Image (spheres, grey):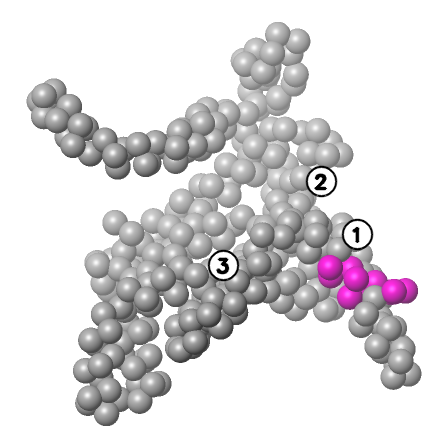
Amino acid sequence: MNVKGVLKDISRNKAMLIMVLPATIWFLFFSYLPMAGTIIAFKEYRYHRDGFLASIVNSKWVGLKNFEFLFSTKDAFLITRNTLLYNAVFIVIGLVLAVGLAIVLAEITNKKLAKLYQTGMFLPYFLSWVIVGYFVFSFLSFDKGMINQIAKAFGLTATQWYNDPTYWPLILTLVFLWKSIGYNSVVYLAAIMGIDKSLYEAAMIDGANKWQQIRHITVPMLTPLITILTLLAIGRIFYADFGLFYQVPRNSGTLYSVTNVIDTYVYRGLKFTGEIGMSTAAGLYQSFVGFVLVITSNAIVRRFNKDNALY
Protein backbone atom coordinates (compact mmCIF):
# COMPACT_ATOMS: atom_id res chain seq x y z
CA MET A 1 0.00 0.00 0.00
CA ASN A 2 1.30 3.44 -0.95
CA VAL A 3 1.02 5.28 2.38
CA LYS A 4 2.11 8.59 0.90
CA GLY A 5 -0.52 8.32 -1.81
CA VAL A 6 -3.25 7.59 0.74
CA LEU A 7 -2.21 10.52 2.92
CA LYS A 8 -2.14 12.74 -0.15
CA ASP A 9 -5.67 11.67 -1.12
CA ILE A 10 -6.87 12.32 2.43
CA SER A 11 -5.29 15.78 2.43
CA ARG A 12 -6.79 16.61 -0.96
CA ASN A 13 -10.26 15.48 0.04
CA LYS A 14 -10.24 16.50 3.70
CA ALA A 15 -13.15 18.92 3.26
CA MET A 16 -15.36 16.14 1.87
CA LEU A 17 -14.20 13.70 4.55
CA ILE A 18 -15.09 16.17 7.29
CA MET A 19 -18.54 16.59 5.75
CA VAL A 20 -19.25 12.84 5.89
CA LEU A 21 -17.63 12.35 9.31
CA PRO A 22 -20.83 12.97 11.39
CA ALA A 23 -22.82 10.48 9.30
CA THR A 24 -19.95 7.96 9.49
CA ILE A 25 -19.85 8.24 13.29
CA TRP A 26 -23.64 7.89 13.47
CA PHE A 27 -23.62 4.70 11.37
CA LEU A 28 -20.68 3.32 13.34
CA PHE A 29 -22.35 3.70 16.74
CA PHE A 30 -25.98 3.06 15.82
CA SER A 31 -25.75 0.60 12.92
CA TYR A 32 -22.49 -1.35 12.97
CA LEU A 33 -21.53 -1.69 16.65
CA PRO A 34 -25.05 -2.85 17.63
CA MET A 35 -24.67 -5.76 15.20
CA ALA A 36 -22.73 -7.57 17.92
CA GLY A 37 -25.94 -7.59 19.95
CA THR A 38 -27.63 -9.92 17.46
CA ILE A 39 -26.15 -12.78 19.46
CA ILE A 40 -28.99 -12.19 21.93
CA ALA A 41 -31.37 -13.61 19.30
CA PHE A 42 -29.82 -17.03 19.93
CA LYS A 43 -29.75 -16.82 23.73
CA GLU A 44 -32.21 -16.86 26.58
CA TYR A 45 -31.21 -13.42 27.80
CA ARG A 46 -31.25 -12.93 31.56
CA TYR A 47 -29.94 -9.92 33.39
CA HIS A 48 -26.69 -10.36 35.31
CA ARG A 49 -25.61 -8.06 38.09
CA ASP A 50 -22.16 -7.58 36.54
CA GLY A 51 -23.61 -5.65 33.61
CA PHE A 52 -24.84 -5.96 30.05
CA LEU A 53 -21.86 -7.83 28.59
CA ALA A 54 -21.84 -10.29 31.48
CA SER A 55 -25.55 -10.83 30.94
CA ILE A 56 -24.96 -11.77 27.32
CA VAL A 57 -22.04 -14.08 28.11
CA ASN A 58 -23.81 -15.85 30.97
CA SER A 59 -27.15 -16.25 29.21
CA LYS A 60 -27.95 -19.77 28.01
CA TRP A 61 -27.74 -20.66 24.31
CA VAL A 62 -31.15 -21.63 22.89
CA GLY A 63 -30.37 -21.77 19.17
CA LEU A 64 -33.43 -20.95 17.07
CA LYS A 65 -35.90 -21.17 19.97
CA ASN A 66 -36.57 -17.42 19.90
CA PHE A 67 -37.43 -17.61 16.21
CA GLU A 68 -39.70 -20.58 16.83
CA PHE A 69 -41.49 -18.62 19.55
CA LEU A 70 -41.99 -15.72 17.15
CA PHE A 71 -43.45 -17.80 14.30
CA SER A 72 -45.25 -20.55 16.19
CA THR A 73 -47.94 -18.24 17.52
CA LYS A 74 -51.33 -17.94 15.87
CA ASP A 75 -50.61 -14.28 15.11
CA ALA A 76 -47.49 -14.96 13.00
CA PHE A 77 -49.35 -15.03 9.68
CA LEU A 78 -51.52 -12.05 10.64
CA ILE A 79 -48.69 -9.69 11.57
CA THR A 80 -46.60 -10.72 8.55
CA ARG A 81 -49.55 -10.23 6.20
CA ASN A 82 -50.39 -6.82 7.65
CA THR A 83 -46.78 -5.63 7.52
CA LEU A 84 -46.25 -6.70 3.91
CA LEU A 85 -49.58 -5.49 2.52
CA TYR A 86 -49.50 -2.10 4.21
CA ASN A 87 -45.93 -1.42 3.11
CA ALA A 88 -46.68 -2.58 -0.43
CA VAL A 89 -49.60 -0.14 -0.62
CA PHE A 90 -47.52 2.64 0.93
CA ILE A 91 -44.69 2.11 -1.57
CA VAL A 92 -46.87 1.99 -4.69
CA ILE A 93 -49.38 4.74 -3.87
CA GLY A 94 -46.78 6.87 -2.13
CA LEU A 95 -44.50 6.71 -5.16
CA VAL A 96 -47.23 7.70 -7.61
CA LEU A 97 -48.50 10.57 -5.46
CA ALA A 98 -45.03 11.87 -4.58
CA VAL A 99 -43.91 11.96 -8.21
CA GLY A 100 -47.23 13.46 -9.32
CA LEU A 101 -47.09 16.12 -6.62
CA ALA A 102 -43.51 17.00 -7.50
CA ILE A 103 -44.45 17.42 -11.18
CA VAL A 104 -47.41 19.63 -10.25
CA LEU A 105 -45.26 21.83 -8.00
CA ALA A 106 -42.61 22.12 -10.71
CA GLU A 107 -45.24 23.39 -13.18
CA ILE A 108 -46.44 26.23 -10.92
CA THR A 109 -45.04 29.40 -12.45
CA ASN A 110 -45.56 31.54 -9.34
CA LYS A 111 -42.57 30.42 -7.26
CA LYS A 112 -43.73 32.11 -4.05
CA LEU A 113 -47.04 30.31 -4.30
CA ALA A 114 -45.24 27.04 -5.08
CA LYS A 115 -43.07 27.42 -1.96
CA LEU A 116 -46.18 28.12 0.11
CA TYR A 117 -47.83 24.93 -1.15
CA GLN A 118 -44.64 22.96 -0.63
CA THR A 119 -44.26 24.20 2.95
CA GLY A 120 -47.86 23.35 3.75
CA MET A 121 -47.48 19.80 2.47
CA PHE A 122 -44.05 19.38 4.11
CA LEU A 123 -45.23 20.47 7.58
CA PRO A 124 -47.05 17.23 8.59
CA TYR A 125 -43.79 15.30 8.32
CA PHE A 126 -42.45 17.12 11.39
CA LEU A 127 -45.41 16.21 13.56
CA SER A 128 -44.89 13.25 15.89
CA TRP A 129 -47.24 10.30 15.64
CA VAL A 130 -48.52 11.13 19.11
CA ILE A 131 -49.77 14.49 17.87
CA VAL A 132 -51.14 12.93 14.69
CA GLY A 133 -52.92 10.32 16.81
CA TYR A 134 -54.71 13.06 18.73
CA PHE A 135 -55.62 14.81 15.47
CA VAL A 136 -57.18 11.60 14.19
CA PHE A 137 -58.96 11.10 17.53
CA SER A 138 -60.48 14.58 17.26
CA PHE A 139 -62.10 13.42 14.01
CA LEU A 140 -63.04 9.87 15.00
CA SER A 141 -63.98 10.12 18.68
CA PHE A 142 -67.41 8.58 19.26
CA ASP A 143 -68.70 11.33 21.55
CA LYS A 144 -66.92 14.49 20.39
CA GLY A 145 -65.40 13.53 17.04
CA MET A 146 -66.01 15.90 14.15
CA ILE A 147 -67.19 13.17 11.76
CA ASN A 148 -69.75 11.79 14.19
CA GLN A 149 -70.96 15.29 15.05
CA ILE A 150 -71.56 15.98 11.36
CA ALA A 151 -73.29 12.59 10.99
CA LYS A 152 -75.60 13.36 13.93
CA ALA A 153 -76.43 16.78 12.45
CA PHE A 154 -77.71 15.00 9.33
CA GLY A 155 -79.63 12.45 11.38
CA LEU A 156 -77.19 9.60 10.75
CA THR A 157 -75.94 7.07 13.28
CA ALA A 158 -72.59 7.72 14.94
CA THR A 159 -69.87 5.15 14.24
CA GLN A 160 -67.68 3.43 16.82
CA TRP A 161 -64.53 4.02 14.79
CA TYR A 162 -62.15 2.58 17.39
CA ASN A 163 -64.18 -0.62 17.72
CA ASP A 164 -64.75 -1.38 14.03
CA PRO A 165 -61.72 -2.64 12.06
CA THR A 166 -63.52 -2.29 8.70
CA TYR A 167 -62.38 1.26 8.01
CA TRP A 168 -58.87 1.21 9.45
CA PRO A 169 -56.86 -0.03 6.45
CA LEU A 170 -58.13 3.03 4.57
CA ILE A 171 -57.69 5.36 7.56
CA LEU A 172 -54.10 4.28 8.19
CA THR A 173 -53.24 4.59 4.50
CA LEU A 174 -54.68 8.11 4.27
CA VAL A 175 -52.92 9.22 7.47
CA PHE A 176 -49.58 7.83 6.30
CA LEU A 177 -49.86 9.51 2.90
CA TRP A 178 -50.92 12.81 4.46
CA LYS A 179 -47.90 12.80 6.73
CA SER A 180 -45.23 11.55 4.34
CA ILE A 181 -46.18 12.57 0.82
CA GLY A 182 -44.93 16.16 1.09
CA TYR A 183 -41.52 15.07 2.36
CA ASN A 184 -41.13 12.38 -0.29
CA SER A 185 -42.06 14.76 -3.09
CA VAL A 186 -39.19 17.10 -2.21
CA VAL A 187 -36.60 14.60 -3.46
CA TYR A 188 -38.35 14.23 -6.81
CA LEU A 189 -38.93 17.98 -7.06
CA ALA A 190 -35.19 18.58 -6.61
CA ALA A 191 -34.49 16.06 -9.38
CA ILE A 192 -36.99 17.76 -11.70
CA MET A 193 -35.34 21.13 -11.07
CA GLY A 194 -32.06 19.60 -12.24
CA ILE A 195 -33.38 18.47 -15.62
CA ASP A 196 -31.90 20.43 -18.52
CA LYS A 197 -34.49 23.02 -19.61
CA SER A 198 -33.28 22.80 -23.21
CA LEU A 199 -34.93 19.37 -23.44
CA TYR A 200 -38.33 20.92 -22.79
CA GLU A 201 -37.61 23.79 -25.18
CA ALA A 202 -36.72 21.34 -27.95
CA ALA A 203 -39.86 19.33 -27.22
CA MET A 204 -42.05 22.46 -27.44
CA ILE A 205 -40.45 23.37 -30.77
CA ASP A 206 -41.37 19.88 -32.00
CA GLY A 207 -44.97 20.50 -30.94
CA ALA A 208 -45.07 18.39 -27.74
CA ASN A 209 -47.78 19.38 -25.28
CA LYS A 210 -47.33 19.41 -21.52
CA TRP A 211 -48.48 15.82 -21.01
CA GLN A 212 -46.09 14.59 -23.71
CA GLN A 213 -43.22 16.51 -22.11
CA ILE A 214 -43.94 14.89 -18.75
CA ARG A 215 -44.30 11.43 -20.28
CA HIS A 216 -41.24 11.49 -22.53
CA ILE A 217 -38.85 13.76 -20.60
CA THR A 218 -39.72 14.19 -16.93
CA VAL A 219 -40.65 10.61 -16.08
CA PRO A 220 -37.71 8.97 -17.95
CA MET A 221 -35.28 11.39 -16.30
CA LEU A 222 -36.74 10.50 -12.89
CA THR A 223 -36.65 6.76 -13.49
CA PRO A 224 -33.14 6.13 -12.02
CA LEU A 225 -34.06 8.01 -8.82
CA ILE A 226 -37.44 6.28 -8.61
CA THR A 227 -35.75 2.89 -8.98
CA ILE A 228 -33.15 3.55 -6.29
CA LEU A 229 -35.65 4.89 -3.74
CA THR A 230 -38.03 2.02 -4.47
CA LEU A 231 -35.26 -0.54 -3.92
CA LEU A 232 -34.41 1.08 -0.58
CA ALA A 233 -38.09 1.06 0.38
CA ILE A 234 -38.35 -2.64 -0.52
CA GLY A 235 -35.45 -3.30 1.85
CA ARG A 236 -37.63 -2.05 4.71
CA ILE A 237 -40.85 -3.73 3.63
CA PHE A 238 -40.76 -5.94 6.74
CA TYR A 239 -40.46 -2.87 8.98
CA ALA A 240 -43.63 -1.03 9.93
CA ASP A 241 -43.91 2.52 11.22
CA PHE A 242 -44.47 1.82 14.91
CA GLY A 243 -46.06 5.19 15.66
CA LEU A 244 -48.59 4.85 12.85
CA PHE A 245 -49.82 1.43 13.94
CA TYR A 246 -49.64 2.00 17.69
CA GLN A 247 -50.42 5.66 18.38
CA VAL A 248 -53.03 6.37 15.70
CA PRO A 249 -55.35 3.41 16.53
CA ARG A 250 -54.72 4.20 20.24
CA ASN A 251 -53.70 0.58 20.92
CA SER A 252 -57.30 -0.56 20.60
CA GLY A 253 -57.50 -4.33 21.05
CA THR A 254 -60.52 -4.68 18.78
CA LEU A 255 -58.46 -3.33 15.88
CA TYR A 256 -55.52 -5.74 16.20
CA SER A 257 -56.68 -7.77 13.21
CA VAL A 258 -55.89 -4.85 10.88
CA THR A 259 -53.39 -2.78 12.92
CA ASN A 260 -51.11 -5.38 14.48
CA VAL A 261 -47.78 -5.57 12.62
CA ILE A 262 -44.43 -7.12 13.45
CA ASP A 263 -43.12 -4.05 15.28
CA THR A 264 -46.18 -3.58 17.49
CA TYR A 265 -46.40 -7.32 18.16
CA VAL A 266 -42.78 -7.44 19.31
CA TYR A 267 -43.27 -4.34 21.46
CA ARG A 268 -46.28 -5.82 23.20
CA GLY A 269 -44.50 -9.15 23.62
CA LEU A 270 -41.47 -7.42 25.16
CA LYS A 271 -43.69 -5.27 27.36
CA PHE A 272 -45.70 -8.13 28.83
CA THR A 273 -43.22 -11.03 28.77
CA GLY A 274 -39.84 -9.29 28.94
CA GLU A 275 -38.38 -11.67 26.34
CA ILE A 276 -35.53 -9.59 24.95
CA GLY A 277 -34.24 -12.56 22.95
CA MET A 278 -37.52 -12.82 21.05
CA SER A 279 -37.54 -9.12 20.15
CA THR A 280 -33.92 -9.34 18.98
CA ALA A 281 -34.81 -12.38 16.86
CA ALA A 282 -37.62 -10.40 15.25
CA GLY A 283 -35.28 -7.52 14.46
CA LEU A 284 -32.71 -9.89 12.97
CA TYR A 285 -35.43 -11.58 10.93
CA GLN A 286 -36.61 -8.23 9.55
CA SER A 287 -33.07 -7.16 8.65
CA PHE A 288 -32.22 -10.47 6.98
CA VAL A 289 -35.39 -10.54 4.87
CA GLY A 290 -34.89 -6.89 3.93
CA PHE A 291 -31.31 -7.64 2.86
CA VAL A 292 -32.44 -10.56 0.70
CA LEU A 293 -35.19 -8.47 -0.90
CA VAL A 294 -32.80 -5.63 -1.75
CA ILE A 295 -30.27 -8.03 -3.29
CA THR A 296 -32.99 -9.80 -5.29
CA SER A 297 -34.69 -6.59 -6.45
CA ASN A 298 -31.37 -5.05 -7.43
CA ALA A 299 -30.44 -8.16 -9.43
CA ILE A 300 -33.74 -7.93 -11.32
CA VAL A 301 -33.16 -4.24 -12.07
CA ARG A 302 -29.59 -4.90 -13.23
CA ARG A 303 -30.87 -7.51 -15.65
CA PHE A 304 -32.99 -4.90 -17.43
CA ASN A 305 -30.93 -1.73 -16.90
CA LYS A 306 -27.57 -1.70 -15.09
CA ASP A 307 -27.53 2.09 -14.88
CA ASN A 308 -30.64 2.15 -12.66
CA ALA A 309 -29.39 -0.43 -10.16
CA LEU A 310 -27.93 0.41 -6.75
CA TYR A 311 -24.65 -1.31 -7.60
Marks 2/1: CA–CA distance: 12 Å
Residue found farthest to the top: 50
| Location of mark 2 (residue) | 268
Q: Nearer the viewer, mark 1 or mark 3?
A: 3
| Location of mark 3 (residue) | 183
| Location of mark 1 (residue) | 253
Marks 1/3: CA–CA distance: 31 Å
Q: Earlier in the sequence, mark 2 or mark 1?
A: 1
Question: Quick one: SS at disc 1?
Answer: helix
What crowding class fits label 2: few (fewer than 14 Cα within 10 Å), some (14-19), or many (20 or more)? few
Toward which corner of the image does residue 223 lie, by quadrant?
A: bottom left
56 w.r.t. 37: above or below = above
273 w.r.t. 80: above or below = above
Q: Amino acid at mark 3?
A: Tyr
Q: Amino acid at mark 1?
A: Gly
Question: Residue 58: x percent and y percent?
Answer: 58, 12
Question: Quick one: SS at disc 3?
Answer: helix
Q: Amino acid at mark 2?
A: Arg
Left or right of 227: which side holds 76? right
